[in-house]
Image (cartoon, rainbow, N blue to C red):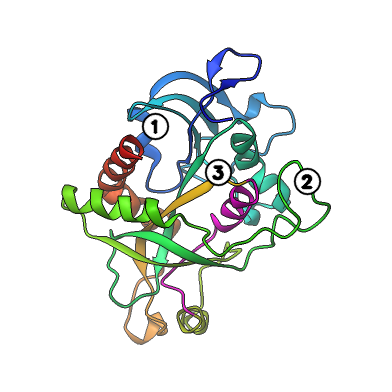
Amino acid sequence: MPGGTVEGGGLPAPEVGIVLGSGLGALAAAIEVVGTLDYSEIPDFPRSTVAGHRGRFIYGRLGGKYVIAMEGRVHYYEGYSIQDVVLPVRAMCCLGIGTLIVSNAAGGLCPLFEVGDIMAIEDHINLIPNPLVGANDPELGVRFPDMGEPYDRKLISLAHAVALAQGTNLRQGVYVGSTGPSYETPAEVRYFRGIGGDAIGMSTTPEVIVARHQGVRVLGFSLITNTLTGEPAQLFGGPKLTHAEVIEAGDRAMPRLCALVREVVEKM
């Protein structure tokens, strides 16, 4: 339970779990570290194969609260089962977190978005296999969990208030979670925009589903690392999108997102 202790360790249970995805990696340096655990030290635990995802848990204090953070995540496109993909978040929920903060790099579908924008996720469209398919463990959650409020409205409001005070223009919209790893075709961009998406990426939604399944509230952010027009790039002589460019764009906006999350944790 939040406010209790980590079983067998005598340490305070973490109140907040954080997925340090693209855009939040530098937040690890702001955590007053009590201990770390590499994924490779945990038997049969999934390990990230993607550049920029280190692969370890960090336990410590941030904004006056005990937190546990995932420095790097695994993705469905890496070949893992969807149950393996969400296992780290399951573990954090079982340790007693009451809040999960997730982040990702995303392509902007909304024409108003620009590279470097931060979007608070208000809802999502999940196109990745649902992690709740299969036998349900009633100790974790109900068979048919309600998803009417996947992202906590009060936390979104708090994020907007903090962003305003910091001088950050915080966008808000719907995130589309797709399998990847190929980037979207122009026709797919038009489709995803047409069904209500404002940003699209290759993670996050399964993690949010299992957190809500276990009754943990969620706050999510997308860092817009590229914008998608839905027009064939060759018509305009546009460059091809690369993973390196996504990382570079994320690095430029990372300080603003880290400052936002740090103060939100402090004020929640």
Picture layout, residue 206 above or below residue 63 = below
- Residue at 72% x, 60% y is 144
Q: What range is drawn magenta here? A: 196-214
Name the mark nearer the viewer: 3 or 2: 2
Which image quarter is the C terminus in? top left
Task: Tell me the residue that label 1 is attached to.
Answer: 28
Label 2 near label 3: C-beta < 8 Å? no
Q: Position of residue 98 (x, y in %)?
A: 52, 39
Q: Residues within 10 Å of mark 1 (few under 14, many from 20)?
A: some
Task: Tell me the residue that label 2 is attached to.
Answer: 138
In the rendered structure, which disc, 3 or 2, sits on the residue that comes first in sequence?
Answer: 3
Kind of residue at badge 3: Arg
Per the model, the C-alpha gap separating discs 1 and 3 is: 14 Å
Horizontal side of residue 193 vs 216, given as left or right:
left
Label 3 near label 1: C-beta < 8 Å? no
Per the model, the C-alpha gap separating discs 2 and 1 is: 34 Å
Which image quarter is the N terminus in? top right
Task: Tell me the residue that label 3 is attached to.
Answer: 73
In the rendered structure, which disc, 2 or 1, sits on the residue that comes first in sequence?
Answer: 1
Q: Position of residue 2 (x, y in %)?
A: 53, 30
Pick the residue in front: 70 or 17: 17
Picture layout, residue 224 above or below residue 104 = below
Pick the residue in front: 171 or 109: 171
Q: Position of residue 228 (x, y in %)?
A: 39, 74
Q: Residues within 10 Å of mark 2 (few under 14, many from 20)?
A: few
Q: Residues within 10 Å of mark 3 (few under 14, many from 20)?
A: many
Kind of residue at badge 2: Pro
Picture layout, residue 206 above or below residue 251 = below
Q: Which element type, helix, strand or loop, lies under badge 3?
A: loop
